[in-house]
Image (spheres, grey):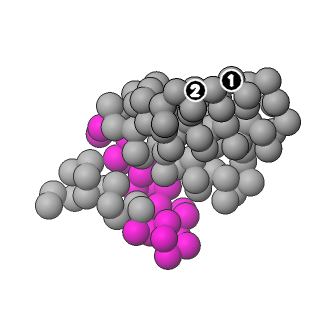
Amino acid sequence: RHPDDPAALLGAGINRAEVGDDEAAARLLEAAARRAPGDHRPPSELSKIAMRRSDPEAALALLDAAIAVAPHEYDLHYRREVLLGRLGRREEAEAERRTTARLR
């Protein structure tokens, strides 16, 4: 594949994240997101990196970006529900729980 191919960048980013190279993973995933703005997977994967970096607000913003392009993805809403709970935003977490229940 071409090195600028969004799917190749996404795959490489996920691979780098799996081996613990979050710095390289983030660069690759950000490039994938720029080249494929309608794909929810790059911001979703970036949100996982943000959580590992102890940046829940950034993780939430990235999940919101992913949900904006894939509003029916159960996993995104479930992860958002858990994250909101961790942030102490109970009412929002409960609303998200209702969304996940509808999507199940």
User: Residue 19 lies in magenta, yes or no?
Assistant: yes
Secondary structure found at label 1:
helix
Does residue 104 lie above or below 50 as drawn?
A: above
Query: Is any atom of residue 72 visible in this view?
Result: yes
Question: 10 Å neighbourhood of mark 2: few (<14), some, or many (≥20)?
Answer: some
Tell me how far mark 2 sits from mark 1, CA to CA: 7 Å
Residue 3 is situated, as x and y percent measured from the top left of the image, at 22, 58
Residue 34 is situated, as x and y percent measured from the top left of the image, at 36, 38
Q: Residue at x 63, y 38 (%)?
A: 80
Does residue 6 lie above or below 92 as drawn?
A: below
The quarter of the displayed image where residue 27 is located: bottom left
Q: In the current view of this chain or complex, which residue is farthest to the right?
A: 88
Question: 10 Å neighbourhood of mark 1: few (<14), some, or many (≥20)?
Answer: few
Picture quarter with the N terminus: bottom left
Residue bearing mark 1: 95
Q: Is residue 22 left or right of residue 90?
A: left
Q: Nearer the viewer, residue 100 or 59?
A: 100
Mark number, residue 3: none
Secondary structure found at label 2:
helix
Identify the main secondary structure in magenta. helix
User: Residue 75 lies in magenta, yes or no?
Assistant: no
**Stretch in magenta:** 15-36
Tell me the kind of residue under disc 2: Thr
Residue bearing mark 2: 99
Does residue 22 lie above or below 9 as drawn?
A: below
Q: Residue at x 73, y 28 (%)?
A: 94
Q: Nearer the viewer, residue 23 or 45?
A: 45
Residue 13 is situated, as x and y percent measured from the top left of the image, at 40, 60
| Callout 2 touching callout 1 (CB < 8 Å) | yes
Q: Is residue 91 left or right of residue 17?
A: right
Tell me the kind of residue under disc 1: Ala
